[in-house]
Amino acid sequence: MIGRAPIALSCGDPSGIGPELAPLARQALGRDVPFFYIGDPAHLPKGTSFQTIETPSQALDVAEGTLPVLLHPFAAPVLTGKPNPANADAIISAIKRGVDLVVSGAASALCTLPINKKALKDGAAFAFPGHTEYLSHLAGGRAAVMMLAAPALRVVPVTIHIPLSDVPVALTPDLLRKTITITHAALIRDFGLPAPRLAVAGLNPHAGEGGTMGRAELDMIIPVLSDLRAAGIDIAGPLPADTMFHARARAAYDVAICMYHDQALIPIKTIDFDGGVNVTLGLPFVRTSPDHGTAYDIAGRGVARPDSLIAALRMAQDMADKRGTNGHT
């Protein structure tokens, strides 16, 4: 698209694999998906071809094999594979800087490299369980939904980064309704699906089996789904989670709404571990991320694969294009 602003890629924790993935993605994507790295070039692998830029628009003029870098200095040392809480403020501010650039129109979307939540909490009293919750905060408290997407499957967990024991209390009719309506709207706006088909998992084994294995389905999930069907949403469920994710079942829906984190993430990471993308739905700007963590154990070894980051950048561009030349709405 002519006139498209580049994507902002925040550096995440530079002690992890993020700094080695960014140049690999640049090499793979070339000018097809223009993006720039918000971070310190000193953290990039030795021999990386990079060019510092002063404004995002300058990224469009950087040579194809060279990584554009919007300088974002770090005060404390970075040791590969070992998080340094003293860098927490710089990591957090890189995310906020990326958001500000998208909101201003200087960037078309935000893609975030992985962070370590404990290091951020230890170093800067980071009060959020993860990117999704922090981005919701930056958007003025706007409700946000985490979706994991791959070519073969999209999943949305209703409850995210909380202990499993807390799920039954956190799983309220209002949260379920908001999650489904935000997901439905995003599939239309950001993914170009005019009539999305949603499938909803039950909380209990066998979706409660008529109340013999728990009553969450009868007392909460079914009434919410009935209301949403009456409002015109194509929605199936509650379905037993153990029969939702084989190939024939997946062909019947566009997204699976799951009740808790692992119910959603185990199937997608099993089906496509390297190609999954983390997408935040419901925000006034586009945000994607590779569906993996900092991978400290392999950082600096040259074996990290950029597949998920490449997919995340491509998806960010596609979502921004569907919203217009600027991914902020």
Image (spheres, grey):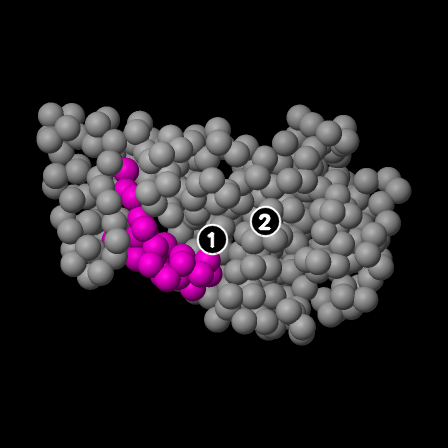
**Residue 277 percent location from the top left of the image:** 53, 45
Circle 2 SS class: helix
Q: Is residue 215 left or right of residue 138?
A: left
**For the residue marked with disc 1, what is the amino acid?**
Thr
Is 189 in the magenta?
Answer: yes
Q: Which mark is residue 280?
A: 1
Q: Which mark is residue 104?
A: none
Could you tell me how far apart the alpha carbons at marks 2 and 1 are, in whole angstroms?
11 Å
Identify the residue at image location x=63%, y=32%: 295
Identify the residue at image location x=60%, y=47%: 311
**Residue 192 percent location from the top left of the image:** 44, 61
Is the Cβ of the residue at disc 2 closer than 8 Å to that at disc 1? no
Q: Quadrant of residue 264?
A: top left
Q: Magenta stretch? A: 177-202
Q: Which mark is residue 312?
A: 2
- Which quadrant does the N terminus fall into? bottom right
Q: Which is more toward the observer, 174 or 192?
A: 192
CA neighbours of label 2 inside 10 A, class few (<14), some (14 to 19), many (20+): many
